[in-house]
């Protein structure tokens, strides 16, 4: 009586048994293998042949030819990321009906030329547990209208006091905001005022 393999139940002829049974068992096993691999192409089998015990080396070689320069989407990396340089996306935001929205998904560096008094909203910060920081340059209009800004109530300023904007013509004030709890709390800082 033949025994069978553990995973696929292929027949294994008995050692010293009827030698004429070998052909039947082998043919049946080859048919089972053929069915099992029926959907696998020759190219796919070549991938398997190319993988050695040093799988990481193989993957590194494959990934070195992947172009990520124009990748769109989220990337999650576990471990330390070391780069020579990185760039942040800049976006200008505008106000409408005394409201201005900074969409955190569109960049980390923003500017806003004041055309009216406006109230800011910070939308789409990353989920709690992921830190996010952005800067915004507030530019007064050329007529020195002295427009004002109302920041979100979730912003905590040093000494609980929001800075007063520079009111002169085309004055530039730069502020930095950071959160790590999905925007429930923002810390606001003055990076510079009366610039340019």
Image (spheres, rainbow, N blue to C red):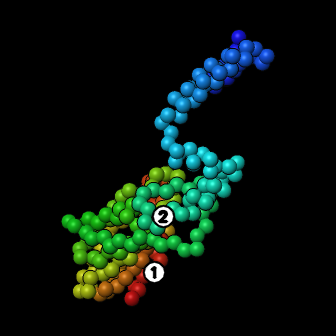
| Residue 159 relative to residue 151: left or right | right
When the figure is inspected, residue 74 is found, relative to residue 193, above or below; the finding is above
Q: Residue 10, percent across and down? A: 63, 22
Q: Secondary structure at mark 2?
A: loop
Q: Residue 162, percent across and down? A: 41, 70
The residue closer to the viewer here, 10 or 196, is 10
Q: Residue 190, percent across and down? A: 46, 75
- The residue drawn where x is 45% and y is 56% is 74
- The residue drawn where x is 31% and y is 70% is 93
- The residue drawn where x is 60% and y is 45% is 48
Seen as rendered, the residue at the extreme top is 1
The quarter holding residue 60 reads bottom right
Q: In which quadrant will I find the C terminus?
A: bottom left
- The residue drawn where x is 49% and y is 57% is 75
When the figure is inspected, residue 165 is found, relative to residue 43, above or below; the finding is below
Badge 2: few (under 14), some or many (20 or more) residues near its Cα, within 10 Å?
few
When the figure is inspected, residue 9 is found, relative to residue 61, above or below; the finding is above
The residue closer to the viewer here, 116 or 95, is 95
Q: Residue 47, percent across and down? A: 57, 48
Task: State the residue position of label 1.
Answer: 192
When the figure is inspected, residue 129 is found, relative to residue 138, above or below; the finding is above
Residue contact at pointers 1 and 2, CB within 8 angstroms: no
The residue closer to the viewer here, 101 or 8, is 8
The quarter holding residue 137 reads bottom left
């Amino acid at each position: 009586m033949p025994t069978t393999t553990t995973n696929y139940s292929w027949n294994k002829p008995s050692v010293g048994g009827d030698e004429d049974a070998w052909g039947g068992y082998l043919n049946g096993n080859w048919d089972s293998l053929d069915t099992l691999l029926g959907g696998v192409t020759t190219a796919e089998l070549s991938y398997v042949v190319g993988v050695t015990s040093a799988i990481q080396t193989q993957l590194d070689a494959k990934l070195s030819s992947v172009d990520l320069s124009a990748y769109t989407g989220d990337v999650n990396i576990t471990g330390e990321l070391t780069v020579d340089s990185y760039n942040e996306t800049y976006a200008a935001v505008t106000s409408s009906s005394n409201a201005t929205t900074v969409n955190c998904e569109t960049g980390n560096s923003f500017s806003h030329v004041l055309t009216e008094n406006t109230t800011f909203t910070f939308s789409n910060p990353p989920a709690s547990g992921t830190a996010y920081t952005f800067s915004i340059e507030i530019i007064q209009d050329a007529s020195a209208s002295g427009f004002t800004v109302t920041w979100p109530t979730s912003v905590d300023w040093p000494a609980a006091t929001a800075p007063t904007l520079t009111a002169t013509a085309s004055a530039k004030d730069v502020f930095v905001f950071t959160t790590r709890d999905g925007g429930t709390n923002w810390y606001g800082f003055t990076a510079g005022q009366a610039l340019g």
